[in-house]
Image: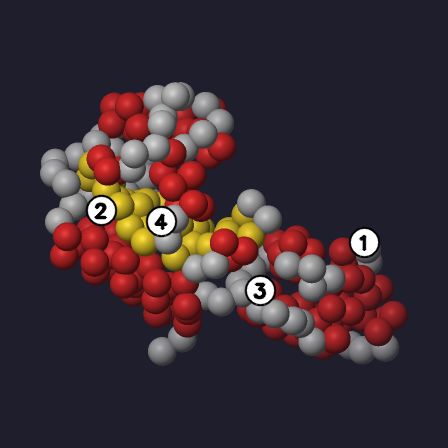
Amino acid sequence: MSKKLSVDIELQKLSEFAPEGYFLGLHIRFASALMQFSTYDQAWLDYYTEQGYALRDPVIAWGFSTEGSTRWSSLGIPDPFGVMTDASEYGLKYGVTVSCGPIRSRSIANFARQDREFTDSEIEEISHIVRRLHEMVEPPESLTQAQIEALRLIAGGDRHAAAASRLAISESALKARLTSARVRLHARTTAEAIQRAKDYKLL
C-alpha cells in the first residue's frame, strides 16, 4: 500500500470522529506544517483567517506547550480574544486537541462536533491515529546531491532546459530529479519543494 493511500485511509477515519470537521498539522517547523489537512466549514476558516486567530488560538497554544490530548472544555488556558466563543457560534461547540512529537517538529490536531463531548475511548482512538500519521510523514533529514542541484537551479530562476544544460543531463532526467525531490519533501509542486527544502535547511 502506498504512503499516500495509507495517509488517506487514516484521514478518513478521523473524519468519522469529527462531524463538524478537523484540522491537522503534521510536523510543524518554523511556523509551517510539513502537511496540513482541514475539513472545517469554509465560512469558519475564512473568519478564522480574517481575525488572525492562528496566533491567538488557545488550543494551538496548548498544543505547543503540552503533549497529549485534552477536551476543549478542559483547556484551562485564557481566551481573551474569544476564539472558542466564536468557534461555538460556527458549530464547533465541543472539541478535542491532540499534540505529539518534539517541539522542533510537533503535530497538532483539533476535532469538533456540536452535539456532545468526545468520549474517552474516542479521544484515545483519535490520539492513536494522529500519532500514526505523525510517524508516517516524517520530514527528510537530507536530500541527494542531484536533488539539491536541480532544486537550486530552478530556485535561481533557470527554466528546465537551461538547468538541464548546466547539469549536462537531459531535460527528462532533470524532471525526474525534481519529481523525486517533491516526493521526498511531501510537496505538490516544485516551488513548494524548494520552500520546504529551505525551511528544513536542506538547500
Camera-near label (2 vs 4) is 4
Coordinates of residue 196 in the picture (x, y in percent)? 62, 56
Give yes or no for contact between labels 1 and 4 (Cβ–Cβ under 8 Å). no
Using the numbered discs, state the Cα–Cα distance from disc 2 to disc 4 in whole angstroms. 11 Å
- Residue at image mark 2: 18
Using the numbered discs, state the Cα–Cα distance from disc 3 to disc 1 in whole angstroms. 20 Å
- Residue at image mark 1: 157
In the rendered view, does 60 fall on the left or right side of 92? right
- Residue at image mark 4: 109
Q: Quadrant of residue 191 in the image?
A: bottom right
In the rendered view, does 85 fall on the left or right side of 191? left
- SS at circle 1: loop
> Residue at 41% across / 33% down in the picture?
57
Give yes or no for contact between labels 1 and 2 (Cβ–Cβ under 8 Å). no
Name the N-terminal-most of marks 3 and 1: 1
Q: As shown in the figure, which amino acid type bears the numbered disc 2?
A: Ala
Coordinates of residue 52 in the picture (x, y in percent)? 49, 27
- SS at circle 2: loop
Using the numbered discs, state the Cα–Cα distance from disc 1 to disc 4 in whole angstroms. 36 Å
In depth, the one of 51 and 125 nearer the eye is 125
Q: As shown in the figure, which amino acid type bears the numbered disc 3?
A: Leu
Evaluate whether residue 4 shows in this view: no
Q: As shown in the figure, which amino acid type bears the numbered disc 4?
A: Ala
Name the N-terminal-most of marks 2 and 4: 2
> Residue at 84% across / 74% down in the picture?
167
Camera-near label (3 vs 1) is 3
In the rendered view, does 125 fall on the left or right side of 46? left
